[in-house]
Image: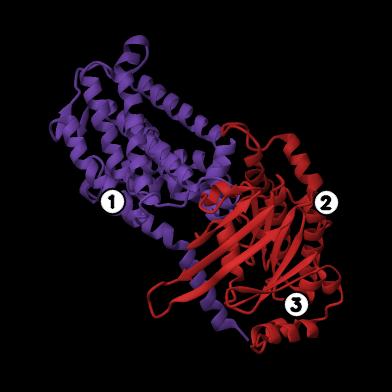
Chain colours: A red, B purple
Amino acid sequence: MLKIQNVHKVFSKGTVNEHYALQGIDLELKTGEFVTLIGTNGAGKSTIMNLIGGDILPDKGRIYLDNEDITYEKEHKRARKIGRIFQNPMLGTAPDMTVEENLAVAYSQSKKGLFGIGIKKEDSEFFKKCLEDFDLGLEDKLKTKVGLLSGGQRQAIALLMSTISTPKLLLLDEHTAALDPSAAEKVMNITNKIVREKNITTLMITHNINQALKTGDRTIMLHKGKIILDLSGKERENMTVSDLLKLYENNSNDIFDNDRMILS
Amino acid sequence: MTLILGSLHIGLIYALLGIGVYITFRVLDIPDLTADGSLTLGLAVSGIMTINNQSILGLVLAFIAGCIAGSVTGLLQTKFGIHPILSGILTMSGLYSINLLIMGASNISLIGKESVFKIFEDMLGGLDKDIVRLIVCFVVCFVVSALFILFFKTRLGLMIRATGNNEHMVKASSINVDFIKIFTLAIANGCVSLSGGLLAQYQSFSDISSGVGTVVIGLASVIIGEVLFGRRTVTIGIISAVVGSIIYRLIIALALQSSIFPSYMLKLVSAVIVGVALSIPTIKKSIENRKLRKGGI
């Protein structure tokens, strides 16, 4: 499904700030696999996401999606195949447009022609049905401006937008980190539901080790631009947070120094 | 009566400019300074074509020429990464030479030529000249507004609104943001240029300096409209730009007639109106904050 081959990325090459963000990443995701990605700050998690999403291009290596080389494909073109949600709920939705209009923009990629009517009646009904499943009361707010909704509701709409025409790959960049605990849980439940129902291959960054181990079916840990842990199956099921921290210290010869990850 | 009719004519002609400025300034959220050049471009193209007895074709070509000018600004902004305001200034500045090239002189007269107004005056011979002019201005303005209102209900229209609101999300929805921006700047400037084209045939002359301060006039129309209608949907926005343009002309005509200020003060007054109107939200906020500071417990 997704295949990352020997990918390297250096930032600010040749300056004092030179930073080797990724040093030869090899990673393969099977169809329908839900992988969580953890690592300390600067480990290269977001860099991987941005390379797959097309914000930045790798210095070396290749990225394949469904056997198609997307390494250098333009960002908006690969967006058709890749859905993305970011930490900041403001990024995924247009605040001055209604819920319905936001969804229609995302839905337009599955339709042909630019001059068709923007929102047809059947579209509205389809959106309503999708939102009912979320159980957030959004189905009655189709005509409400998104800017008036809470962060959790906005993030739920962003999720629906990026999966409304099923993508091949879903990238989640700490998409619940900016929400309060109860909203975060709701959004996580919706995420699980959508990913399982539509069988979307998913890569999720999280700072919460507990969540990383419980969500999805595989956990990968990055350290200084390299993959140092790849857990799945039984081994992962029996893993606790403290076990993982020990493994981390052994594999990286470094002490885990991120309070946010340990305490959450 | 002549004062009101005259203001209606000019107001409806400049309403097209208002619509163009509304589209870039409010919908796309890019202040586009190309308008100063593209209005004159419309005057030039339509003027030359009218002299050659092709007034209706002249209006069509004025629109197309404006679209090209807008595309240039759009290309500079997107493909070459130049600051939006500077891109507009560059195109506007370049257009000054282009306009002189088209006109061949800094001022051309269309008196006695077959303008669209003349064509319809001959066709509707029984009617008063001013009424015919009003009908022509109204029909053109109505058709253009209606087309834009319908256009913003299409998928592409939605994408344009989304681009002005959150570019990031539009990219994530697999839409080419650069194309959307270039396209929008093109149609908006086409509309501005059409406004100039109609103006040239109405006043029977084209002058190279007609475009000075155009953006400010357009903004004034948009803002006056918003004061009356509020900022709501795009449909209301387009209508309010038209109404705003007519009211702006009435205010100016009344002020000039009652000699409140001499005509050379026109641009300054317009600039002050726009400046004040745009600063109202911030001033309101700071008054509120001051009240809170004084009355807070």
Residue A247 placement: quadrant? bottom right
Q: Left of A71 or right of it: where is A208?
A: right
Distance CA(mark 2)–CA(mark 1):
52 Å
Chain of the residue that carries numbered disc 3 in the rendered image: A
Residue under label 1, please give it: B89
SS assignment at label 3: helix
**Up-down relation of residue A66 to residue A41 (above or below):** above
Distance CA(mark 1)–CA(mark 3):
53 Å
| Three-letter code, disc 3 | Ile
Q: Residue at x 67, y 38 (%)?
A: A119
Q: Is residue A5 visible?
A: yes
The percent coordinates of residue A136 (x first, y second) are 81, 58
Q: Earlier in the sequence, mark 3 or mark 2?
A: 2
In front: A171, or A247? Answer: A247
Mark whose residue sits in front, 1 or 3: 3
Q: Left of B174 or right of it: where is B50?
A: left
Chain of the residue that carries numbered disc 1 in the rendered image: B
The percent coordinates of residue A261 (x first, y second) are 71, 81
Residue B138 placement: quadrant? top left
The percent coordinates of residue A151 (x first, y second) are 69, 65
Residue under label 3, please give it: A209
Q: Is residue B10 visible?
A: no
Residue under label 2, please give it: A197
Distance CA(mark 3)–CA(mark 2):
25 Å
Q: Are marks 3 and 2 on the same chain?
A: yes
